[in-house]
Image (cartoon, rainbow, N blue to C red):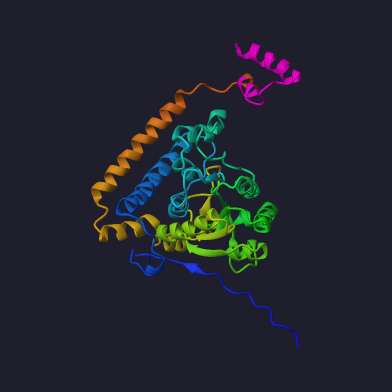
Amino acid sequence: MSAVLETKPTQFLQILDIDGNVKNSDWMPKLSDQELRNLMHKMVFTRIWDGRAVKLTRQGRLGFYAPVAGQEASMLGSEAATNKEDFLLPSYRDIPQSVWHGLPLYQAFLYSRGHQHGGQIPEGVNVLMPQIIIGAQIVQTTGVAMAFKLRHEKRVAFTYIGDGGTSQGDFYEGINFAGAYQVPAVFIVQNNQFAISVPVRLQTAAQTLASKAVAAGIPSMQVDGMDVLAVYAATKQSVDRAREGAGPSLIETITFRYGPHTMSGDDPTRYRTKDMEQEWQLKDPLVRFRKFLEAKGLWSDRDEESTIEEAKTAVSEALAKADSYPKMTVAGLIDQMFEKLPDDLIVQRAEYASEEGR
């Protein structure tokens, strides 16, 4: 008689329901009232910043931009569970985590424009440039985490990838190496239901994306990515165990992007129904967490309005600084390529500098 093959479901974590009620107190993170308020502040600020960035892109004032509305809990709840000495390796959508981890907002705008200064990370900010190549950040995260392990540093490397990215070879290679060498890494899969326009069900036969970690020997769990407390709790547990030498973890956050994949011509109405979008609007992470905080007397309309105005001012100031930054030149770009330029680039630089009047 042949054995019966069985696929077991992955653990799913939710703390707040869509009305902001606590449904799982066992996992409630130990956060102070101010820390709870800070989480809400970051999400509201990011929602306003994202809306402005979308408009700026349409006006031609930014370059490449991937909207994040809907994914704030997944992004910011996870980043908040790390320490500033931990190293973030973002994908192209993970600009909010990069900024809250220390990257100046004006440099995020310059990065969107393709300006080289956008990628010149300030000293002491433990963030790598956003990765455009799908899945490459998974391999790089494993490498950074390996360095921490070899140096006996209690630091963690953490990264993000979308649902479609888990179908890339780099994803499997990276988590396999991480599991084999038990490096201090946390991999966060943001399952926003579509790899551009391809739904998850057409990307993989896996019951969950979290289950893909099983073959690499990595513990994983699935989390309600619209619940900032659940994301924080799951990430904090994973970061703490990695820091103490227990190895890597993988978290799949079930979330949704309200806008297009990027502002480069994607039209989500061609592959998403209105019913689907309305269903996810009911799960909005800001609305859910706001209800929770209001019930505790920790958030008010005044707090909301103050944060909105703060975000508008910060975005305007960052944009003005980005606008005032010197424009790139080819000669300047060549200067950034090597500490000591090889002979052929010295010749090319001289030619471009002459043409550019430098």
Q: Is residue 34 left or right of residue 92?
A: left
How many labels, in total? 0
Q: Residue furthest bottom?
A: 1
Residue at the (72%, 83%) spot, across then down: 3
Residue at the (57%, 41%) spot, across then down: 130
Up-down: is 98 above or below 338?
A: below
Can you tell which quarter of the image residue 335 is in? top right
Q: x, y (%) of residue 241? A: 53, 58
The question of residue 106 being in magenta is answered with no
Residue nearest the viewer, comparing 223 with 49: 223
| Highlighted range, magenta | 332-358
What is the chief secondary structure element of the magenta stretch? Answer: helix
Q: x, y (%) of residue 4? A: 69, 82
Q: Is residue 339 left or right of residue 23?
A: right
The answer to whether residue 255 of the structure is visible from this angle is no
Can you tell which quarter of the image residue 100 is in? top left
Q: Quadrant of the C terminus?
A: top right
Residue at the (54%, 60%) spot, across then down: 252
The question of residue 357 being in magenta is answered with yes
Q: x, y (%) of residue 274? A: 46, 60
Q: x, y (%) of residue 349? A: 68, 17
Residue at the (62%, 25%) spot, across then down: 336
Up-down: is 120 above or below 153?
A: above
Q: Quadrant of the N terminus?
A: bottom right
The answer to whether residue 175 of the structure is visible from this angle is yes
Residue nearest the viewer, comparing 193 with 322: 322
Up-down: is 11 above or below 62?
A: below
